[in-house]
């Protein structure tokens, strides 16, 4: 039987010149292992199917997601304060056009850059023009959506002010009207359940009164980063724990039209005692079961979060393979009763549909 093709729906890349704190605030020295070049040629070495004794899945292509590049305080000339994200697009253009490796042109089929979603809509429109100019026609055709990371808004009032603002909702509607999706980066673990709950409200508002064909597609990253450490109620009088809250919020998000979920980004959220692949698959089972019940295989997709998956991954620099094998174990679990067709949706067809590949 031919190997199952994978579309890796969530990878990150950056060149050597952007592998520093000046370009990424989170690349703090001296102990940030990701502060070095990560190109597709490096991805190929770890996503090689020969790393497994059971070679039944193989990467067909990848989706790039923005890396939270530094940008300036919004003020004045848009091209000036968005220099970092625009330079990121220039780098991606070089990748798509084969300046790093000719193989890259066929591999990088979709790009999800940063966009100033918190700004007035006319600023977003100006930025989109600049981004298209910087990308060039070949790369712009591969820009399928945008992301503006929300997980860092840990103050609930500030998060609400941004996400439920008229600007943010109008900008989501603009993306939908122009045929772009929006990748959602929220975090129950580090911020709180409020991020999921408020984002769900924004999603529904962004679709309110919008024609079906213009509704923005939402693609949720990393299972909303569950809080695995406070699963149960923290005191005898409490009725609910983090798992119950997460389930309710994910259900609400899934009820929004054109919304998808990524099985990705879990190594950084798991307790250190989670173990290796089999233990991780067993540990995360309740969360994955709920995702499958809400989204089903046709709205759930595989993503590796490479190279971020290496930071706390069980196999260090080889943790891409570890996450692939966790997902293989999850999808083969008899409790989910998934057919071969269902599994092929998770591995590739859902990403193909969600990102309009």
Image (tube, rainbow, N blue to C red):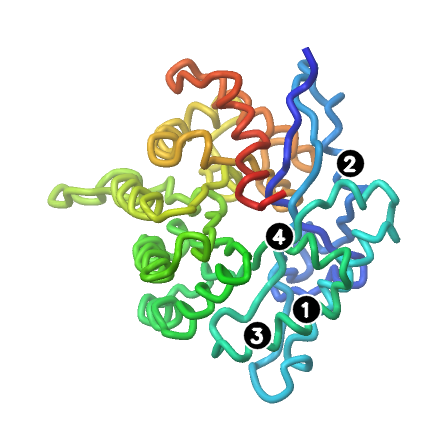
Q: CA distance from mark 1 to mark 3?
A: 10 Å
Task: Determine whether the residue tagged by mark 2 lies in a helix, strand or loop.
Answer: helix
Q: CA distance from mark 2 to mark 3?
A: 36 Å
Q: Which residue is identified by label 2?
A: 44
Residue 154 placement: quadrant = bottom left
Rendered view: 53 above or below 51 = above
Q: Quadrant of the C terminus?
A: top right
The numbered dot on residue 125 is 3
Task: Determine whether the residue tagged by mark 4 lies in a helix, strand or loop.
Answer: strand
Task: Of the two numbered discs 3 and 4 on the same chain, state the one appearing first in sequence.
Answer: 4
- Along the line of sight, which residue is nearer the eye, 237 or 86? 86
The numbered dot on residue 131 is 1
Q: Position of residue 353 (x, y in %)?
A: 55, 40
Q: Please tell me whether mark 3 or mark 4 is closer to you in this view.
A: 3
Task: Determine whether the residue tagged by mark 1 lies in a helix, strand or loop.
Answer: helix
Task: Of the two numbered discs 2 and 4 on the same chain, state the one appearing first in sequence.
Answer: 2
Within 10 Å of the Cα at label 2, are there few (<14), some (14-19), or many (20+) other Cα atoms?
A: few
Q: Please tell me whether mark 4 or mark 1 is closer to you in this view.
A: 1
Q: CA distance from mark 2 to mark 4?
A: 17 Å
């Amino acid at each position: 039987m031919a190997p199952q093709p994978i579309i890796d729906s969530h990878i990150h890349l950056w060149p050597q010149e952007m592998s520093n704190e000046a370009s990424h605030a989170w690349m703090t020295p001296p102990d940030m292992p990701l502060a070095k070049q990560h190109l597709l040629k490096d991805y190929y070495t770890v996503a090689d199917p020969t790393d497994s004794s059971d070679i039944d899945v193989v990467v067909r292509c990848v989706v790039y997601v923005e890396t939270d590049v530094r940008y300036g305080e919004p003020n004045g000339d848009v091209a000036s304060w968005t220099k970092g994200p625009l330079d990121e697009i220039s780098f991606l253009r070089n990748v798509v056009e084969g300046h790093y490796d000719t193989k890259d042109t066929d591999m990088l089929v979709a790009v999800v850059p940063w966009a100033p979603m918190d700004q007035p809509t006319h600023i977003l429109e100006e930025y989109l023009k600049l981004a298209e100019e910087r990308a060039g026609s070949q790369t712009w055709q591969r820009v399928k959506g945008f992301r503006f990371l929300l997980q860092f808004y840990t103050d609930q009032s500030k998060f609400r002010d941004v996400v439920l603002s008229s600007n943010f909702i109008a900008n989501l509607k603009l993306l939908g009207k122009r045929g772009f999706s929006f990748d959602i980066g929220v975090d129950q673990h580090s911020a709180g359940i409020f991020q999921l709950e408020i984002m769900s409200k924004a999603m529904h508002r962004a679709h309110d009164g919008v024609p079906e064909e213009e509704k923005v597609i939402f693609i949720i990253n990393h299972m909303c980063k569950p809080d695995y450490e406070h699963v149960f109620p923290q005191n005898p009088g409490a009725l609910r724990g983090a798992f119950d809250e997460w389930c309710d919020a994910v259900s609400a998000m899934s009820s929004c039209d054109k919304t998808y979920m990524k099985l990705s980004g879990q190594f950084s959220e798991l307790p250190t005692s989670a173990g290796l692949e089999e233990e991780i698959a067993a540990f995360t089972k309740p969360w994955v079961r709920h995702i499958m019940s809400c989204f089903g295989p046709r709205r759930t997709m595989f993503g590796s979060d490479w190279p971020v998956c290496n930071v706390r991954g069980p196999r260090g620099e080889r943790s891409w393979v570890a996450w692939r094998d966790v997902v293989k174990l999850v999808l083969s679990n008899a409790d989910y009763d998934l057919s071969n067709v269902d599994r092929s949706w998770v591995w590739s067809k859902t990403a193909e549909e969600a990102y309009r590949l």
